[in-house]
Image (cartoon, rainbow, N blue to C red):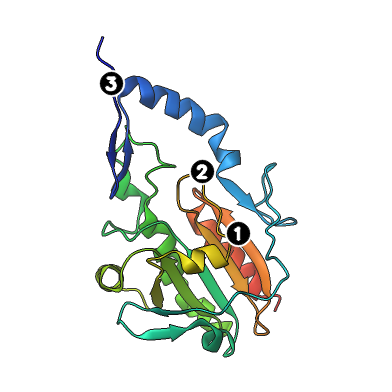
């Protein structure tokens, strides 16, 4: 019998055949919710698999200058010197819509491996005015190029900067963990005006949770 191989589309995710889809569904309803949602201790979003990030309470590694979607140089140290920063890492730019309904037809796709990245990013967009009231700067980071970020920012009407971390230097500096050993982590860091990391929220599935937790922490600064 010929062996059925899954089809891997790097721009979309891992598409599974019927039998594999059943196995994946069982995984998502049992193990995945706990494995894919982790956060720093004492978080209201903590599951029984909590994560104590080594940079929590430490000065943020700000020795980084990268390009934003306008191909402008952004010095992270200078940005943090101006006030609190919410720095969120996401896997990849997407041109899809900002609602979960955009993926309603993909019932054969593992949601955890094909996350609608726009949901997380656009959740920050939709609450951008609230972040401004807290005096916080919002910055998104992925390995995509400045050109890709420009298209993404235009398509989704983003008001904040997206940094191109094409060599993964910033992701490495912030010790962003991978999910399942190979998926780029989806992690949000709240950095106070003194440059100290006050909170780390990591979840591949709780897209809006990144925004909710960041605002919760900012309200205490």
Q: Indicate left or right for 21 with 133 as reference.
A: left
What residue is pinned by disc 3? Answer: 4
Which sits in the foreground, 144 or 153? 144
In percent of width and height, residue 182 lies at 46, 45
Q: Earlier in the sequence, mark 2 or mark 1?
A: 2
Q: Secondary structure at mark 1?
A: strand
Say above or below: 187 vs 58.
Answer: above
Q: Earlier in the sequence, mark 1 or mark 3?
A: 3
Q: Residues within 10 Å of mark 1 (few under 14, many from 20)?
A: many
The number of numbered badges drawn on the structure is: 3
Quadrant (top left, top right, bottom left, bottom right) of the C terminus: bottom right
In percent of width and height, residue 197 lies at 66, 72
Q: CA distance from mark 3 to mark 2?
A: 23 Å
Q: Residue at x 37, y 50 (%)?
A: 100
> Which residue in the rendered view is the most extreme toward the top?
1
Which sits in the foreground, 202 or 167? 167
Say above or below: 110 vs 184.
Answer: above
For residue 181, which numbered disc appears in the image?
2
Q: Residue at x 27, y 56 (%)?
A: 96
In percent of width and height, residue 144 lies at 33, 64
Q: Residues within 10 Å of mark 2 (few under 14, many from 20)?
A: few
Q: Residues within 10 Å of mark 3 (few under 14, many from 20)?
A: few
Answer yes or no: do the residues labelled 2 and 1 have beta carbons within 8 Å?
Answer: no
Q: Residue at x 44, y 70 (%)?
A: 140
Q: Secondary structure at mark 3?
A: loop
What residue is pinned by disc 1? Answer: 201
Q: Indicate left or right for 122 with 104 as reference.
A: right
Q: Earlier in the sequence, mark 3 or mark 2?
A: 3
In percent of width and height, residue 37 lies at 58, 47
Q: Residue at x 30, y 30 (%)?
A: 6
Answer yes or no: do the residues labelled 3 and 2 have beta carbons within 8 Å?
Answer: no
Labels 2, 1: front one? 2
């Amino acid at each position: 019998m010929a062996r059925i191989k899954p089809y891997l589309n790097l721009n979309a995710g891992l598409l599974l055949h019927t039998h594999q889809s059943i196995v994946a569904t069982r995984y998502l309803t049992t193990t995945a919710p706990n494995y894919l949602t982790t956060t720093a201790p004492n978080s209201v979003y903590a599951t029984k698999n909590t994560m104590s990030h080594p940079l929590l309470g430490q000065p943020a590694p700000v020795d980084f200058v990268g390009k934003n979607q306008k191909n402008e140089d952004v010095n992270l140290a200078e940005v943090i010197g101006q006030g609190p920063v919410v720095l969120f890492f996401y896997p990849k730019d997407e041109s899809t819509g900002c609602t979960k309904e955009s993926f309603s037809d993909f019932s054969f796709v593992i949601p955890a491996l094909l996350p609608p990245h726009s949901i997380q990013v656009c959740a920050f967009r939709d609450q951008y005015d609230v972040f401004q009231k807290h005096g916080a700067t919002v910055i998104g980071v992925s390995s995509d190029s400045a050109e890709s970020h420009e298209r993404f920012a235009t398509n989704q009407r983003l008001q904040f900067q997206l940094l191109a971390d094409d060599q993964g230097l910033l992701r490495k500096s912030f010790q962003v963990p991978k999910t399942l050993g190979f998926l780029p982590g989806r992690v949000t860091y709240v950095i106070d005006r003194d440059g100290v990391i006050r909170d780390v929220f990591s979840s591949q599935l709780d897209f809006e949770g990144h925004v909710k937790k960041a605002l919760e922490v900012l309200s205490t600064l």
